Image: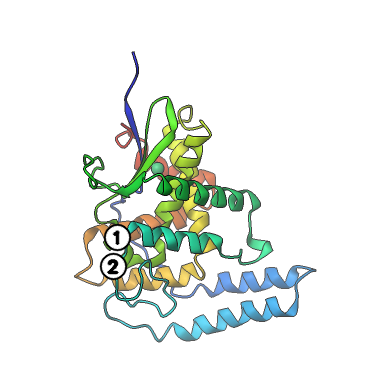
């Protein structure tokens, strides 16, 4: 008998703990970056100047942040055209733009992650081209995601290469609040989708699957979103204090904060993934 169990790999079940905000500008990190660039025998003066300039610019800009609404950051990259609401397509375009951006510095780049990010992006474009990417419950399809999930890679047992990616109904609104940070979910689902295509999903432990996906998110945020730390701190500060911000936006920011805090190492990420997914609840 054919086994037709449907499997969902859910992205980002929001955490429930309180948020600890980072300092607005992590000067220590910036100084370390400048030191790394200086230590590179191949470093040219232009690269050093660029890093130092970025560090000083951010230190100054810290005191000029708009306090209202969504305009948390003058360097924010919107996931929608000016004056428009975000859509899955426009968020996918933002994801593509960020993915295609040049790496920040050879000293900070991990070649394996870079290859995986590119692979993931191609896979997401492929799924989208087939019409297998969209908002949950649209186009006559049944709603499948639980409230706490942002997205899922969905496939049939025995056919993991032919999956689809479904996003929570509120995902476009989430992107209106979080700008380019919404694309971390694409990096997460892309990892499941690539592994599905490579027939590598069904044998893996479900926590381990989430760890590799969350590590892709971590790499994506920290290497593809320029000055992510500064942007994230300001966005979190504003959104967390905004009574109009929906709970799912705040929960997602907590989740992203935990990815940043934990997923820089496989062990740290495993602890967080176990807390989120270890009970098996999110794996049907
Ligand atoms: Zn997942």
**Residue at horizontal 48 percent and vertical 67 percent from the top:** 228
Residue 169 coordinates in the image, percent (x, y): 24, 53
Residue 283 coordinates in the image, percent (x, y): 33, 34
Q: Is residue 2 above or below residue 71?
A: above
Q: Nearer the viewer, residue 60 or 169?
A: 169
Q: Is residue 244 above or below residue 116?
A: below
Q: Is mark 1 within 8 Å of ligand 1?
A: no
> Mark 1 or mark 2, which has the lower sequence index?
2
Residue sitting at the far front: 130
Reading the image, the residue beneath label 2 is 85
Reading the image, the residue beneath label 1 is 172
Residue 88 figure quarter: bottom left
SS for dot 2: loop
Residue 205 coordinates in the image, percent (x, y): 45, 31
Residue 271 figure quarter: top left
Contact (Cβ within 8 Å) of mark 1 with mark 2: yes
Q: Nearer the viewer, residue 106 or 257?
A: 106
**Left or right: 202 with respect to 106?**
left
Q: Quadrant of the N terminus?
A: top left
In which of the image's four quarters is ligand 1 placed? Answer: top left
**Left or right: 262 with respect to 255?**
right
**Residue at horizontal 51 percent and vertical 72 percent from the top:** 26
The answer for how far apart the CA atoms under marks 1 and 2 are is 7 Å
User: How many numbered dots are placed on residues in this image?
Assistant: 2
**Residue at horizontal 45 percent and vertical 28 percent from the top:** 202
Residue sitting at the far top: 1
**Res 88 seen here:** yes
């Amino acid at each position: 008998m054919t086994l037709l169990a449907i499997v969902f790999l859910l992205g980002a079940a929001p955490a429930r703990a309180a948020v600890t905000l980072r300092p607005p500008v992590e000067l220590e990190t910036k100084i370390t970056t400048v030191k790394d660039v200086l230590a590179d025998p191949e470093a040219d003066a232009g690269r050093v100047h660029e890093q130092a300039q970025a560090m000083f610019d951010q230190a100054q800009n810290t005191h000029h942040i708009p306090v209202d609404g969504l305009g948390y950051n003058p360097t924010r990259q919107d996931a929608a055209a000016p004056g428009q609401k975000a859509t899955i397509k426009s968020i996918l375009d933002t994801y593509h733009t960020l993915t295609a951006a040049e790496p920040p510095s050879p000293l900070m780049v991990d070649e394996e992650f870079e290859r995986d990010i590119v692979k993931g992006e191609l896979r997401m474009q492929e799924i989208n081209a087939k019409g297998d990417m969209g908002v949950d419950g649209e186009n006559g399809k049944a709603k499948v995601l639980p409230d706490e999930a942002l997205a899922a890679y969905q496939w049939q047992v025995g056919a993991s290469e032919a999956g689809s990616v479904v996003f929570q109904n509120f995902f476009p609104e989430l992107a209106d609040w979080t700008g380019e940070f919404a694309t971390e979910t694409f990096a997460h689902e892309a990892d499941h989708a690539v592994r599905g295509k490579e027939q590598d999903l069904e044998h893996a432990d479900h926590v381990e699957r989430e760890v590799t996906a969350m590590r892709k998110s971590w790499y994506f945020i920290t290497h593809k979103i320029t000055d992510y730390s500064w942007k994230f701190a300001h966005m979190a500060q504003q959104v967390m204090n905004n009574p109009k911000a929906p709970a799912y936006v705040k929960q997602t920011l907590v989740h992203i904060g935990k990815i940043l805090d934990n997923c820089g190492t496989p062990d740290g990420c495993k602890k967080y993934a176990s807390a989120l997914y270890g009970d098996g609840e999110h794996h049907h």
